[in-house]
Each structure stands twice: as C-alpha cells, then as structure tokens.
Image: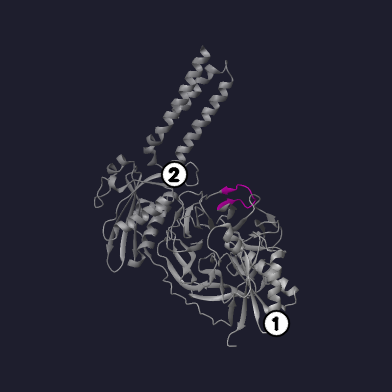
Amino acid sequence: MKKTFVLVSLVLLVFGLILAGCPSRKVVQPEIEQRPTVTPKETTQKAAEVKPEEKITEQRFAKIETKEETPKYIEERGLFGDIQFDYDKYDIRPDAKPILQNVASWLIKNTSAKILVEGHCDERGTNEYNLALGDRRAKAARDYLIALGIASNRIEMLSYGEEKPLCKESTEECWTKNRRVHFVILKEAGK
Amino acid sequence: MKEKFKVQSLRPELRPRVSKFKVLIFILLLFTIHYSLFTIAEAKVYIDISSPAFKKLPIAIQEFSGPSGKEISDIIRNDLEFTGLFFYIDRNAYLENPSQPFNPKNWTPLGVETLVKGSVQEGKDFSVTMSLYDVFEGKEIFKKEYKAEREFIRPLSHAIANDIYYTLTGETGIFRSRISFVAEDKDKMGIYIMDWDGNRITSMGLKGNIILSPRWSRDGTKLIYSTERNRQWGIYLLDFKSMSERKVFSSKGTNMVGDFLPEGNDITFSSSKDGTPDLYIMSLSNNQIIKLTSSYGIEVSPAVSPDGKYITFVSDRGGSPQIYIMHRDGSDIKRVTFEGSYNTSPSWSPKGDRIVFVSRRGTNQIFTVRPDGSGLTQLTTVRNNEDPSFSPDERYITFSSDRDGVKGIYIMRANGESQKRITPKNLRASGPRWAPN
C-alpha cells in the first residue's frame, strides 16, 4: 500500500516536472534580458544606431564566344552497321566480328580513307562513367581492327557516352540499340 | 530549481525501503539538470542549428515599404523558408502596418518571436534599410542600410537574408551563392550560371557539342570543364577575372576533368591517352602531368577532399563501378561503397565528412556515405537523380533530375527534405555545381 503510494507520488512528480518544464521555457523569458548577447558585432543596440552600410554589387559577365574550328574531314556514315555490346560491358561479342571484318576489308581497299570509331552507351548510367565505358568500347573495336591488320594511325576514336542516343525511348529495345560502336568514314576535306 | 528540492526531500523517506527508487530519483535529477542546461543553451542562440532537436523560429517578414518592397521581402522570405529553420507567419495575419513603428504587443499574440521590417528609397541607387527585432525583448537587434543599382536588387535582398541568418544562427548564409550548370543551346551545349534559387540564369557564351559538369576553383574565380569539340575531348579553363577561356589539356581518347586541388594551381583529371581511362594530376602553371593510377579497367571522376589529402574516384577494378578513396599521390587505395552494383559521380562535402554520389538502384538515386564507408543514406527516390554536389555550408545539395520529364536542376536540404526544381521546365539542363562562395 505504502509502496503504491510512493509510486503514484513519483509518477505525479515526473508529470509535474514535465509540466513545469514545458512552460518554463516561456516563463524563463525575463531571463533573456540578462543573457549575454552572443550575436555578431552589429547586433548590439549601439550598432543599430550606427547604421552600418553596405554597397551590393557584383561582376557583370561578358560573354565569351567559342571559336568554331573548320572540320578537317568530311564524314560518311551508314556504310557499315553498328556493333552492339552487353550492359556495362566492353568486350567484342561474336556477332560483332563479321561487321569488324567488313570494316577492315573496306579499309584495306580504300587506302586513303580513315575510320572514326564512335563508342556509345545506353542512358541508364551516369554521364562521366558512360563516357569512359564508350571509350573502352571504341578501344575494343579499334584493337580488333588493328589485329586484322589496319594501321593504328588510320583509326580515330571518340566516345560519346550516353549523349548521342540512336533511339530515345526508355525501353530495353532502345537501350540495346544504343549500346554500340558506330563507324564513320573520314575523308580529308578538299579531296 | 524548486523541483530538484522536492526530489531531494523525498529521498530520506525512500532510502530505507526500496533502493531502486534511488536510481529512479537519480535519473530524475539528471533529467532536471539536463533540462535546465537546455534552457540556458536555448537562451543564448535564437536557433541552434547544430542541435538535431532545434525548434523552428517563428518569424514575421513585413512587406518593405517603398518601391520593390514586396519583391525584396518575398526574396528574403523564400531564402529563410528554404532553410527549414524558420516558421514563417503569414503576412495576412499581421496587425501592425508596415509604416507603423515596431510594437511587440502587435506580434506576441501571433506567436512571432523575430520580426523583419524595412523600407526602400529609390534614387540613383536603391537604398534599403532593414531592421530585425526580438519580439520578447521588445528591441531592435540588428539594423543596416544596403545600397545597390536596380539590376542588383536580388543580390541585395539575398545579402539582407544573409545578415538575418547570421544574426539568428551565428552561421554564414549561402543566399548570395551561385550554381553553374550546362544546358542545351540550339544544337550545342553551353555553360550557364544562376543564383542558388534558380534566378538570373546567365549564359557564359561558351559552347561545345557536349560539355560535362564544370568544377569551381576553391576561390570561385575559375571553372574547369571537359568538352567535345571537333571530335576531341579537351579540358578547358574559364577565368572570371580575365573573362577568357583557355585549353588546358587535350589528346586522343577521352579526357575528363575531376577537380581543382585546394591551392588552385593543380587539377585532377581522367584520360585514356595511354589506352584505358586512368587518373592524373596536372599543374596549370607548368603543364606537368603525374599519373596516379594504372589499371586495365576504367578510372574516372577524381574528386579532391577539402583538405587536399585524398582523392575519391570511380573504378570498375572490382567488376562493377564503385567509389574508392586514395591518398593524393595515388597510394593506399580503399573501396568506399559495397552496396549496389553501380556507384558513381562522387563529390565531397565542404567539411570532408561525407561523400555524395549516385547509386543505380533500378533508377539513379543520390546517396551520401562517410569516407570510411559507414553511414550510407539515401536522399532521393523519384525517377533518375544525378550530378550531386554540396552547398558551401554543407546544408544543401544541388543535383539534376528527370522527374518532371525534361532533365533540370534541383536543390534539396542535405537530409533530402524540400526537393525542388529551380530551372524552368523547358530548359534541358544538367551538371550543376554549387559555387564555393
């Protein structure tokens, strides 16, 4: 009995503390007047009378024009099909080999032409990593062409990452088409 | 203090009987002491933003009197509201007229604790006087006059918001900071700069077929970026002091800039010039290049820690793209991310205690993690979210998202709250970076 009484009174005390605690934040208000002003220099009442002044200004940007360079080559697209890659992979698949053979045979016959090997990715990754992935895909195709006897100085490489999709929908079918290496024939301008 | 005595007076009565009550009382005592400490702490600072249990500060921002008064007070309100630290009391409820002098009796019934009042005079320049009041104390705690040409009315309003923020929290506000990004410009891409709230979008005029996210120098006077021009990936530097662009590096293969080192004379970048994408440091003063990694796989996105001692980057050496960390000289490589099979685009928080990055979980989402790999936290969930970077005060993150259709620039608080688009819906934009100042 006595134990319960003590318990009840304790519970009441806890409640009392909580209840007293809550409004005490408001009741405490008069205390605020004595608090040290931690606030920055301008915030004391004196500073308020001084009325500091600030002139707000900033740099006006002049536009910079990017100089357009004249292209050295004329591009010819569409002679060869694209070769495709698996998701997040950069190894040459068996189905790509006949196309690479084709490209190599054409280059052997057309000795004055160069080839540009473009590496592309689907949109699902992030752009910097995809540019590196496109770079590896282009390099895989280039290495394959070199192995087939093409001089390395006739093969240019460029990664476009996910930036130049062939197909713009977010479907598996589109992504498959976009994970590709695309071949572009380069002929010197003016020839 | 009274409560404490009550507790003590109970003690002798209890001691002989039940000893566990002693423990309870001790806890109660601790509670009381803790509580009184808390009250004292609260009295010193208006908002203790470092406390996880801070209370939003009820603030009233009166429409400034004079020309553009509403515009100015609305900008201040937007700035302060986005922080999540203030509870804004709506203007319709105000009893005091903007032209009337401050009377605390008009504000206490509304629950207002701090009040902003101001007036605008338009002469050759705009001149704005702002006063900040503590309603409980019934006094002015800050007053200042601001002058600016008409075109700088937004920076002027942000400067006022910064002063209010500093007075109430003791921390420097970011309301005058800017964000760089890239956006489609006709058939090319261009570099843009805007205010952190998405206003005053300004084209730098620079273009490229593709431009990747520009990175700021630590002093905010330079941007460095990678762009494809004429079938070549080059790294370029934009100097805001001379307003000029110069090519810093180009070669065959893919060259992508990582970051400035703190001193501002060196940059990190990735290049496949030697075959596969590896990481390098290059001096901008003498063009000397130091190779940091050489692996068969991919290594990209080298981001430098705020103290300049570490570089975090992405590598597929473990079979899938993951975040790694190493010393600045390329030594002591450690893996940071282990969850998920695609983690990329790392960027440091300004204090260096967190790395924000993109993790592919079906779609691309933004996460943060500590550099030791602990404390992985997901911040976004809707559609694809990429290119994250912190604000200079570490309280916000900017990123790009396609959640509204066309990709645009967004901001959010560093805990993922209040995600909002800041670029217009018809502008295809990506690669945002928060300027350091």
In percent of width and height, residue B147 lies at 34, 64
Mark 2 lies on residue:
B44
Camera-nearest residue between B208 and A5: B208
Scheme of colours in the image:
one colour
Camera-nearest residue between B308 and B45: B308
Residue B357 in which image quadrant: bottom right
User: Residue A71 shows which numbered tag?
Assistant: none
Give the position of the N terminus of chain B as an image quadrant. top left
Mark 1 lies on residue:
A109
**What's the residue at 41%, 43% (across, down)?**
A35
Chain letter of mark 1 equals A
Highlighted magenta segment, given as a residue range: B365-377
Q: Residue reaching furthest bottom?
A: A191
Camera-nearest residue between A111 and B358: A111
Position of residue A52 relative to residue B224, above or below, is above
Chain letter of mark 2 equals B
